[in-house]
Image (cartoon, rainbow, N blue to C red):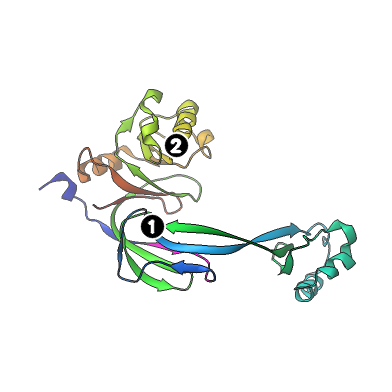
Amino acid sequence: MPAFATLASHPIAWIVSYPVNGSEVLVTSGEMVTQGQRIVEIKEEDLALIDISHLVYGWTEPKKQILREQLEGKPELLHHLFGKKVTIPEQGVVTGLDEFMRVQIRTGVFRERTLYSPVSARVGELKPGTMRLHFQAWEFPISGTGMAKVWGNGDFRLLQRINDLHFSQEGQLVFCSRIDRAMVAKAAAVGVKGIVVVGNDMNLNLEGLLPMAFLSSAAFQELEHTIKPQTTYRLLLNIKACRLMVVVQ
C-alpha cells in the first residue's frame, strides 16, 4: 500500500463571505473551481467612521438610542449637539451610529475588488453573501494562540537553519525544527505566510510576528507517511480550530 494512502481524508467546507449588495458571483453551485480562480467581483462604497464615543461618555443607553434613531440623514443634528467637535465631509451622507458610537458616513467613493478561490474545490451551497467551497483534506492537530487562518503551499521540508529560508518560499507555509527571532524575521522578509514548529515547544515571545503553530514530532511523522514525497501541497493553517489541513490532490 503506498504511504500516502495510510490516512483517511475528511470533507471540508470553506465558507467565503462577501457583501450582499454590490457583489457579482461568477460561479454556480456544483461547479469545480481551481485555486486562484475568480469567484466574486465586488463593488462597494467606502464607509467613513467618526468616533464620538468620548462626546457621549456618561450618556444613558436610552439617550444614545434616541440619537441613533434621529441621526440618519441629519448631519446638522451632530453640529447642533457637538458644534465643531465633529466634522462631517461635505460629500458624505450620514447613515447612523454603530454599536461603538461611531458615526457612519457614506462617502460616495466606490472601489472594486475580486475574491479568488484559495483552493481547488467544488462550489456548494450559494446563499446571499456566502458560498461554500468543498474539498477533501487530511487533518493534523496543532497548538497555538490566536485566530489566524492562513492558506499557503508547502512541501514539508524540515528547515533547521536560517540559511534554509529563501525567496522561493514566498507565499508558503514552512516547517522548522527550531525557531528564533532571526529566523522569524527572515521568514517574514522572504514572504512566508506562516510557520509550523515541529517537535519543540514554541517560544511564545515570537508569536505575533507571523502566524505560528506547534506540531508534535509524532504528528509530523504521520504526515510524512501520508503525503507523496517531493510534492508541494495546498495547506490551511487554522490556528483557531487547532488544525493543519493538507488538501488531497
Left/right placement of residue 88 relative to residue 166 reads right
Task: Residue at 49% x, 45% y: name it.
Answer: 145
Q: Which amino acid type is shown beneath numbered disc 2? A: Gly
Compared to 140, does 107 lie above or below?
A: below
Q: Which amino acid type is shown beneath numbered disc 1? A: Ser
Mark closer to the chain start, 2 or 1:
1
Is 18 covered by the magenta stretch? yes
Task: Residue at 48% x, 69% y: name it.
Answer: 129
Q: Which residue is mark 2?
A: 191
Between marks 2 and 1, how big is the CA–CA gap?
20 Å
Left/right placement of residue 106 relative to residue 236 reads right
* Label 2–label 1 contact, CB within 8 A: no
Compared to 224, does 238 lie above or below?
A: below
Is 157 covered by the magenta stretch? no
Judge by depth and name the residue closer to the eye, 93 or 85: 93
Judge by depth and name the residue closer to the eye, 156 or 71: 71
Task: Determine crowd level at label 2: few under 14, some 14-19, many 20+ residues with C-alpha closer than 10 A.
Answer: some
Residue 219 in percent (x, y) is at 29, 43
Q: Which residue is mark 1?
A: 117
Say which quarter of the image contains residue 25.
bottom left
Looking at the rendering, the stretch of residues picked out in magenta corresponds to 14-20
Compared to 115, does 66 lie above or below?
A: below
Residue at the extreme left = 1
Compared to 66, does 143 lie above or below?
A: above
